[in-house]
Amino acid sequence: MKPNESIKVVGEKKIFFKRLVEDISNYKMITLICLVLVLIISIIIWTIAVAGNVIVAGGSTSVVQIMANVTEQYKRDNKKDILYNSLGSAAARVGVTNHSYAFGFLSKDIPSTPQPGDNQGNARQLWEDERIGRFVIARDYIALIYHLPIGCEIKPEQESLQFKSFDGGEGTKLICQIYNNRNFTWQDAFGDQLVCSTGKKNKFYTLTRESGSGTRDFFESKIIKSKNYETNQVASSSGSMYQAIATVPCSIGYISFSYIREIINNENLGKKTIASVIGNKTTKPELPYKIIDNNYEFNPAYSLTRPFTGIINYQGKQFGIVLSFIAWILDPLPYSKTKPKLRNGDYNPYYVSTFKLTEHDAAYWYIKEGEEPLSFDDILFLKYNNNTTFAKSEQKTDNEKVPWNFNLDYKSLWDIIVERFPEKYQLYRGYEYNGMGN
């Protein structure tokens, strides 16, 4: 080979590898690689699990802490092992559809009338797939968290930084500037809320979650109202988001409520690094939590809330075994026994004044983690878990502008649970078919 030809080949190789690196760095390529890895890892884990009679589930990283507690208690009570593989909400959809997971969790809503956005196609696909059943185990709040610039503190009269309303409001405009304007500084955004010891202007270090994350879907649909925005770093999980913000001054991002305790106890963060938000129906900024008996409980006035949605494949090989776990986790009676009144103010017929939740009740773990379980008077429970009557009624809600209009042969997951375990769930048969409050 001639010297010039050799130089040309080396140059072409450099160009090739440069383009390859650029392609791999491309957002879509990263997403594709992640999904391929999800499939490979899921198949390996599934093969091992089936051989050992272990139930394998997977999905949202935001559900990890709840699942750790719930599955431990379920194993103690029912002698069944459940392995939860936390690779993100997108992994749940893929894994449940191809039978790699017996069930999965998505940290987002799956509306019957999907809104424009990243998850529109996925939501429609799940709704139209007759093999897939949906259920909701708990609600979650999304907290906006940040690591203040060095030398800056929040004014003493404030609990934390304050955002005005999102979902297209002034808070959305501000977060868009934070993420998209590289010259926008902390002093520009929060100058009237901060006291800084130096005259230095500090730029934001922004974080978002990976493509396919349910937490990211919520951020894009409710907070920033866009899927086209810039960011300094993509965190691959809730844990990665937490670690990045805990260690990087000037950083800002968003995370599940289940990390509230860790954030508050972290020496680099603390209470003042969780933003308060003025909701569409509130006039003052609200934090996502309230401290009750030394526990961090949900603040009902906080506006950034979402459901944790489960999906299961009716044709899955372990469907029967998994159904008993879902029946156990969806059992609303223990929690309902603790509530004297329903949401509409009526007396709750299931209320027992002397009843106390124990660690043998699934709802106990939700409350321990700050996640409020669904109960008889909860519209989400009616909507997702036993929605036979509602789905056929042609009713609408504030969030569902179009009636569901399911066929008469539609059967919810709760219908199947009642049929499969009548001796345990016959108490709910009237509620299932009549719909409390309808």
Image (spheres, rainbow, N blue to C red):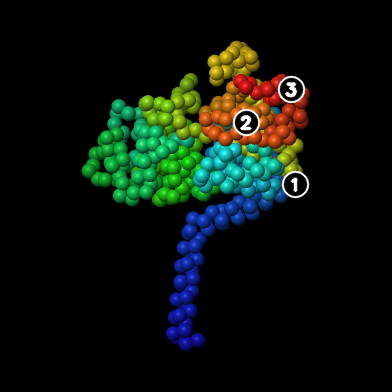
User: Does the rendering let one see residue 49?
Assistant: yes
The local crowd at label 1, few if under 14, some if 14 to 19, many if 20 or more residues have their Cα within 10 Å, is few
Disc on the earlier residue, 3 or 1: 1
Disc on the earlier residue, 1 or 2: 1
**Taking 360 as reference, is 106 above or below it?**
below
User: Residue at 64% across / 37% down in the picture?
Assistant: 134
**Left or right of 196 in this view: 76:** right
Quadrant location of residue 178? Answer: top left
User: Residue at 48% across / 25% down in the picture?
Assistant: 300
- Three-letter code, disc 1: Ala
Disc on the earlier residue, 3 or 2: 2
What is the C-alpha distance between the residues marked 3 and 1?
A: 34 Å
3 vs 1, front mark: 3
Residue corresponding to mark 1? 51
Quarter of the C terminus within the rendering: top right
- Three-letter code, disc 2: Glu
Do the residues bearing badges 3 and 1 touch, measured as CB atoms within 8 Å?
A: no
What is the C-alpha distance between the residues marked 3 and 2?
A: 26 Å
Q: Residue 426 carries which label?
A: 3
Q: Is mark 1 on a helix, strand or loop?
A: helix
Q: Nearer the viewer, residue 133 or 209?
A: 133
- Three-letter code, disc 3: Gln
The local crowd at label 2, few if under 14, some if 14 to 19, many if 20 or more residues have their Cα within 10 Å, is few
Q: Which residue lies furthest to the bottom in this view?
A: 2
Q: Nearer the viewer, residue 211 or 378?
A: 378
Residue corresponding to mark 2? 394
Do the residues bearing badges 3 and 2 touch, measured as CB atoms within 8 Å?
A: no
